[in-house]
């Protein structure tokens, strides 16, 4: 692989510096006072965790920052990550009534971060009532946002929450999957520390199904919560996939998240296959690591692209080149990648999901010279693991749960986050985990 | 644990936050809803003589994009019969025995009329009575409200009619539309009132529409002064509360009112001597739900400062209040600009140059402007620090050696002792001795 030259440390830091900086006190108060403090507001409804946004903002305006953090955390245990990583323009800020007036919406994400930063800077003052221990324990698989939220909520409800995390550093996607210019691992670890402060135990470096069997933890605990997210990107199923320089997007993003920039090699010319938010992250990160040219290869058009508008804009600002209606058929090269053979596509009729099906154009084959291929075709649930659990019904390749209680078809097993929804936002997982804790509580109480 | 409970002239409530006698406390429905939200007390919308209201009733000032920094009204006292109100007061008190339910009263200036309404109010189980001597519009034309509050003798006479029959605490609500608030407060004291509530609303016209030339609020092309309230009246209210708090001839518990929107505002009133605080405009703007932040913010502040009860906080700032003649003339501060924080807006320069004492220099350095205080010339007025848009960029720094002090009153006493008249020459001599340069 022809590697892009390494940058200076200061260049890396500049490239991965956060794109939305923290508010100063004055600017936070000004912005908070711009909030209309709507009643029964649309922003609350648009937030998957239903944070009482006008109230937490009102409390910033009165300098009741501890109260503000309490309002936020009551609804969302990973509120710092959400403040930095949520697609706010599609959620709370997109619903802000100012949009209807044709004015800038309130910067809810930044204000949330202002309150939560203050909370962590003040060493997490105790704000939450914790029920006395009820002697019951719940095993939680995965310490991502769903698992953390579930552990936090269960701990406050009086349960012993034991989280099994295969990685040595906990936090799941919050620690390993968010572009560093949005949120750093240190942010995620603050949230982990908060959950641990409630008494939850996080066992890292333990993979359930390998280091300990599912049956063992199933026997050990009164209930199980599965928050394992998804596996690596699906394989491309084209020749050349094993060449040096072909990497999986999830692995690549995790490597970057080590935050030792010089350790991650990128090609001079990089093709990212797929056009979801993960593909954009991989593309922008490759570019910021010093790749000269980064391309996104997508077989449908701009209109069908799964990435949201904000991410698309971000990628364009980073100079990412988009090859729409392009489908790779072979990765070229002897040992290392040298090119990507592709076909031009056109769109046919809509499929069952309403998306137009791409159809190859005859004799349209062409080659794009590249040194590195990052596959970001979307992820699937970890099939092997979920199939090993008794009575666990899988539907559409996802774990089937009750929408209210998050109980699976195995009564003692609950699940939430990406492994039940196929890959939504951190904030959805945070909500699932929290609701599942109450589902588990009701279930155990009913026994 | 922080205890927010208070006792204002014998009226107790679990927190100091009361609804002021106003539209939000008009009915049992509203007062009960407020109590469910967490309010500590209510002063029921004034009940009394028959009235009729008009449309519109309110006018507002918006300022630089902020809605309702001031609200005025020409709404009268309750337009529902006395019977209805008394019945609802009794019902509300029965449902919320731990909250303060205070009945605000206003009837014609006849002893029998007051005796009658006071006795009927006591029968409801209300915790106290507030006498509305403040309403500045409408009722005052009929010899009630401010027409009473502006004449200390009337204020005393009617309060006596009430206290001679009342078995529950009596608060007298004072109008700010007077030149000296201490006089009606002393009248309340002389008539054995248990406390005073202040301020009521201020006479005002909110504005004139430049297209229609209509005055706000407008009632079918006519207008009149209304009662001004909301965040912008707070400084006036704080001053009047402090004047009552420092007056040894008053020495009564105070229920503070006037522009309270946040827990911070409430604490300012309490630091100046108020026992309870009353809120209206902020509720009219945002609803009863604001009480969550009022209680939580105040509790968090008390915890952070190590206070456990409001008794420790009440009146803590009052002792600073004095006369100009007692200020130290030798206390010397100058402005310092933190050049690293400066964003080069030059507002400090223009404010000092045109609006104060011309002691900031504006120079060009490396392609941008630089503002620097000539400390020898700075009079320490603090205008530059007030206009500066950057937090902690301009600070006022004390520069005298703190070894000496001299107030104006002491200086005048010195002059008298030394047989010197107060003259520019003698003042200049004093200034020269202490290195004070006047520009």
Image (spheres, coloured by chain):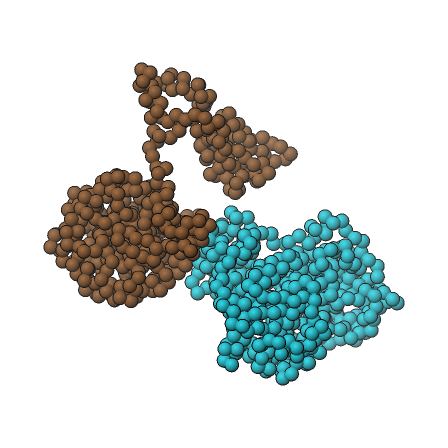
Chain colours: A cyan, B brown
* Residue placed furthest toward the left: B112
Q: Residue at x 49, y 67 (%)?
A: A131
- Residue B227 picture location, percent across and down: 28, 49
* Residue placed furthest toward the bottom: A391
- Residue A351 picture location, percent across and down: 65, 79
- Residue A243 picture location, percent across and down: 83, 68
Q: Residue at x 52, y 69 (%)?
A: A133
* Residue placed furthest toward the top: B419
* Residue placed furthest toward the front: A135
Nearer to the camera, B158 or B366: B158
Q: Is residue A183 visible?
A: no
Q: Quadrant of residue A330?
A: bottom right
In the picture shown, does residue B143 fall above or below B44?
A: above
Horizontal relation, residue A429 to residue B183: left or right: right
Q: Is residue A327 visible?
A: yes
Question: Which corner quadrant holds the C terminus of chain B?
Answer: top left
Nearer to the camera, B248 or A392: B248
In the picture shown, does residue B415 fall above or below B95?
A: above
Question: Which corner quadrant holds the N terminus of chain B?
Answer: bottom left
Horizontal relation, residue A319 to residue B116: left or right: right
Q: How many marks?
A: 0
- Residue A194 picture location, percent across and down: 57, 60
Q: Residue at x 35, y 38 (%)?
A: B319
Q: Quadrant of residue A136?
A: bottom right
Nearer to the camera, B189 or A159: A159
Q: Residue at x 54, y 52 (%)?
A: A122
Q: Quadrant of residue B326?
A: top left
């Amino acid at each position: 692989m022809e590697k892009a030259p390494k940058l200076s440390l200061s260049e890396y830091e500049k490239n991965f510096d956060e794109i939305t900086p923290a508010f100063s006190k004055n600017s936070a108060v000004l912005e908070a006072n711009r909030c209309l403090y709507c009643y029964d507001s649309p922003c609350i409804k648009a937030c998957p965790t239903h944070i009482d946004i006008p109230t937490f903002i009102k409390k910033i305006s009165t300098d009741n920052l501890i109260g503000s953090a309490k309002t936020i955390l009551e609804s969302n245990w990973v509120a710092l990550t959400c403040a930095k990583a949520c697609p706010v323009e599609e959620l709370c800020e997109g619903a802000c009534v100012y949009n209807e007036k044709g004015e800038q919406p309130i910067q809810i994400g930044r204000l949330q971060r202002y309150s939560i930063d203050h909370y962590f800077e003040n060493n997490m003052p105790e704000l939450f009532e914790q029920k006395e221990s009820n002697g019951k324990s719940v095993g939680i698989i995965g310490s991502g946002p769903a698992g953390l939220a579930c552990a936090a909520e269960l701990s406050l409800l009086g349960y012993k929450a034991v989280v099994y995390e295969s990685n040595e550093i906990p936090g799941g996607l919050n620690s390993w999957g968010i572009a560093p210019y949005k949120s750093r691992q240190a942010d995620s670890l603050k949230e982990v520390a908060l959950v641990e402060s409630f008494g939850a135990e996080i066992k890292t470096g333990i993979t359930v199904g390998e280091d300990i069997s599912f049956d063992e933890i199933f026997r050990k605990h009164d209930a199980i919560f599965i928050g394992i997210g998804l596996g690596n990107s699906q394989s491309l199923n084209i020749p050349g996939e094993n060449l040096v320089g072909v990497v999986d997007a999830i692995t690549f993003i995790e490597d970057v998240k080590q935050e030792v920039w010089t350790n991650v090699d990128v090609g001079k010319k990089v093709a990212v296959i797929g056009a979801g938010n993960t593909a954009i992250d991989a593309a922008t990160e490759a570019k910021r690591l010093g790749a000269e040219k980064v391309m996104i290869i997508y077989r449908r058009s701009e209109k069908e692209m799964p990435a949201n508008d904000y991410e698309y804009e971000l990628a364009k600002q980073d100079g990412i080149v988009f090859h729409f209606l392009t489908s790779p058929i072979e990765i070229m090269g002897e040992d290392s990648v040298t090119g990507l053979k592709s076909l031009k596509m056109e769109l046919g009729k809509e499929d069952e999901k309403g998306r137009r099906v791409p159809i190859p154009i005859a004799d349209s084959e062409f080659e794009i010279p590249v040194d590195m291929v990052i596959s970001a075709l979307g992820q699937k649930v970890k099939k092997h693991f979920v199939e090993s659990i008794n009575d666990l019904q899988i539907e559409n390749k996802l774990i089937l749960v009750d929408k209210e209680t998050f109980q699976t078809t195995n009564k003692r097993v609950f699940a939430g986050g990406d492994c039940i929804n196929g890959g939504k936002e951190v904030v959805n997982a945070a909500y699932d985990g929290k609701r599942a804790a109450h589902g588990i509580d009701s279930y155990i109480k009913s026994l | 644990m922080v205890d927010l409970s208070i006792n204002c002239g014998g009226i107790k409530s679990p927190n100091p936050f009361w609804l002021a006698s106003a539209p939000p406390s008009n009915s049992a429905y509203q007062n009960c809803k407020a109590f469910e939200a967490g309010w500590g007390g209510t002063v029921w919308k004034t009940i009394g003589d028959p009235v009729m209201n008009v449309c519109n009733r309110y006018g507002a000032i918006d300022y630089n994009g902020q809605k309702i920094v001031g609200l005025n009204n020409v709404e009268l006292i309750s337009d529902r019969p006395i019977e209805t109100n008394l019945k609802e007061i009794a019902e509300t008190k029965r449902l919320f025995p731990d909250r303060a339910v205070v009945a605000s009263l206003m009837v014609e200036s006849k002893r029998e009329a007051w005796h009658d309404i006071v006795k009927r109010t006591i029968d409801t189980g209300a915790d106290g009575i507030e006498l509305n001597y403040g309403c500045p519009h409408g009722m005052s034309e009929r010899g009630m409200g401010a027409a009473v509050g502006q004449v200390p003798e009337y204020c005393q006479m009617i309060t006596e009619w009430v206290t001679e029959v009342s078995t529950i605490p009596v608060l007298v609500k004072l109008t700010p539309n007077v030149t000296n608030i201490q006089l009606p407060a002393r009248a309340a004291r002389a008539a054995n009132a248990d406390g005073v509530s202040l301020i009521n609303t201020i006479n005002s016209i909110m504005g004139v529409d430049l297209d229609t030339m209509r005055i706000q609020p407008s009632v079918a092309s006519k207008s009149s002064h209304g009662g001004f309230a909301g965040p912008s009246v707070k400084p006036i209210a704080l001053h009047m509360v402090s004047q009552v708090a420092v007056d040894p001839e008053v020495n009564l518990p105070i229920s503070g009112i006037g522009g309270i929107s946040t827990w911070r505002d409430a604490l300012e009133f309490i630091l100046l001597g108020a026992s309870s605080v009353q809120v209206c405009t902020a509720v009219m703007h945002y609803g009863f739900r604001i009480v969550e932040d009022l209680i939580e913010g105040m509790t968090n502040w008390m915890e952070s400062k190590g206070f456990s009860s409001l008794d420790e906080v009440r009146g803590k700032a009052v002792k600073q209040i004095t006369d100009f003649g007692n200020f130290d003339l030798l206390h010397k501060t100058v402005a310092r600009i933190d050049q690293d924080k400066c964003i080069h807006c030059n507002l400090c320069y223009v404010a000092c140059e045109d609006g104060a004492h011309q002691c900031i220099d504006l120079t060009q350095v490396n392609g941008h402007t630089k503002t620097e205080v000539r400390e020898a010339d700075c009079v320490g007025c603090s205008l530059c620090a007030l206009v500066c848009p950057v937090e902690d960029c301009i600070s006022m720094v004390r520069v005298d050696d703190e070894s000496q002090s001299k107030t104006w009153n002491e200086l005048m006493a010195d002059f008298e002792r030394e047989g010197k008249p107060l003259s520019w020459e003698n003042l200049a001599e004093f200034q020269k001795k202490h290195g004070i340069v006047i520009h």
